[in-house]
């Protein structure tokens, strides 16, 4: 309100006159890294205060004006160590290396970094082991194709993509449906509408199509239509794995609101009980995490796409020519 230079309502102008007409003891500025912007500088110029205190979790500024805070607000008094805050549970559950890369990345690969968060691998693998032991059939949804292939290869599990040959796709589906030893399949977004798997009783969503409510409804329906729904004591499970303090949190909020609007409840879990007792989970050591991060960084920007064709690396026009029906050939002269 203070930074706005346009015409104000009578009530807003009265409030601004009140703020400007007093000399305040302290001005507390949250997200102070935004202060160097020309619009927000007006706040410091308009309102008089004996002292100013700025707070921020990311003391960086893309236009390199962060040093202007030294005379706008004052020198930096304290900086907490991110590792200490993470160990105490105050900030993101992303690993430090991945979160640093996420903050520095300016391209679409930001999406790839929070989807490939090693903590997601740990949570996904732990939930798979837990529900497999309970006899559940599990679908893992990963919309990003680069991440999907990495998950499938790392966890050694079958997967289905949109451009997969029909024979191979049907083999995986029939095995999942009929083989008691085949309890897991990883799907891209092609599984939202094109595949029927009523045997599934547990769904783990590693990544989704941003904040799509339609997609959330479709995936929720996968579990609600389970064959075992009529069994005594039956319970279905829907997990959505989210990297904290990233853009993914915004999409999660939209999904949560949709669930509330439909009358469902949900529970936010920040720590899976028992996961700490599983030392053999994928990317459990720092070196393997750094290797994974190097793989993500060297990937092309198109790898962050959710599109099936661009993500899998196949070109739409590179497919084999289709054999036309004889009537089509006779009508249009096709050979």
Image (spheres, rainbow, N blue to C red):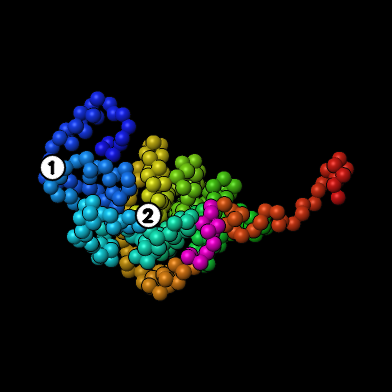
Q: Position of residue 318 (x, y in %)?
A: 71, 57
Q: Is residue 308 magenta?
A: no
The residue nearer to you, when weighing 296 against 150, is 296
Of the numbered discs 2 and 1, the one sitting upstream in the chain is: 1
Distance from the alpha carbon under mark 2 to that under mark 1: 30 Å
Quarter of the rendering occupied by the N terminus = top left
Q: Position of residue 270 (x, y in %)?
A: 31, 56
Q: Which residue is mark 2?
A: 63
Write down the region rendered in magenta: 296-306
- As drawn, the residue found furthest toward the bottom would be 287
Viewer-closest of 88 and 191: 88
Residue 226 position, x and y percent, is 49, 47
Residue 150 at least partly seen = yes
Within 10 Å of disc 1 (Cα), the crowding (few <14, some 14-19, many 20+) is some
Type of secondary structure dominating the magenta stretch:
helix
The residue singled out by tag 1 in the image is: 24
Q: Is residue 197 visible?
A: no
Residue sitting at 28 percent across and 58 percent down?
67
């Amino acid at each position: 309100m203070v930074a706005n230079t346009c015409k104000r309502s009578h009530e807003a102008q009265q409030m601004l006159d009140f703020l400007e007409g007093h000399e305040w003891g302290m001005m507390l500025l949250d997200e102070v890294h935004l202060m160097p912007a020309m619009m927000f500088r007006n706040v410091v110029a308009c309102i008089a205060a004996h002292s100013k205190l700025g707070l921020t979790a990311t003391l960086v500024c893309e236009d390199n004006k962060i040093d202007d805070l030294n005379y706008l607000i004052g020198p930096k008094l304290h900086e907490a160590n991110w590792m200490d805050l993470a160990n105490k549970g105050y900030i993101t559950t992303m690993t430090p290396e991945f979160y640093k890369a996420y903050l520095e990345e300016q391209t679409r690969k930001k999406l790839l970094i929070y989807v490939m968060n090693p903590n997601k691998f740990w949570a996904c693998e732990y939930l798979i082991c837990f529900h497999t032991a309970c006899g559940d059939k599990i679908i893992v949804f990963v919309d990003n194709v680069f991440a999907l292939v990495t998950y499938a290869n790392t966890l050694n599990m079958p997967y289905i993509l949109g451009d997969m040959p029909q024979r191979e796709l049907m083999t995986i589906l029939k095995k999942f449906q009929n083989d008691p030893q085949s309890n897991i399949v990883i799907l891209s977004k092609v599984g939202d509408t094109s595949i029927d798997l009523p045997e599934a009783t547990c769904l783990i969503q590693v990544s989704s199509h941003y904040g799509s409510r339609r997609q959330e409804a479709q995936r929720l329906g996968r579990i609600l239509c389970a064959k075992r729904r009529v069994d005594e004591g039956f319970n279905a499970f829907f997990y959505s794995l989210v990297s904290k303090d990233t853009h993914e949190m915004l999409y999660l909020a939209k999904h949560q609101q949709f669930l509330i609007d439909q009358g469902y409840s949900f529970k936010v879990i920040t720590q899976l009980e028992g996961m700490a007792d599983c030392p053999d989970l994928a990317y459990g050591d720092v070196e393997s995490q750094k290797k994974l991060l190097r793989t993500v960084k060297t990937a092309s920007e198109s790898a962050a796409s959710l599109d099936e064709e661009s993500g899998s690396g196949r070109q739409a026009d590179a497919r084999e020519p289709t054999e036309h029906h004889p009537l089509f050939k006779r009508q249009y002269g096709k050979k």
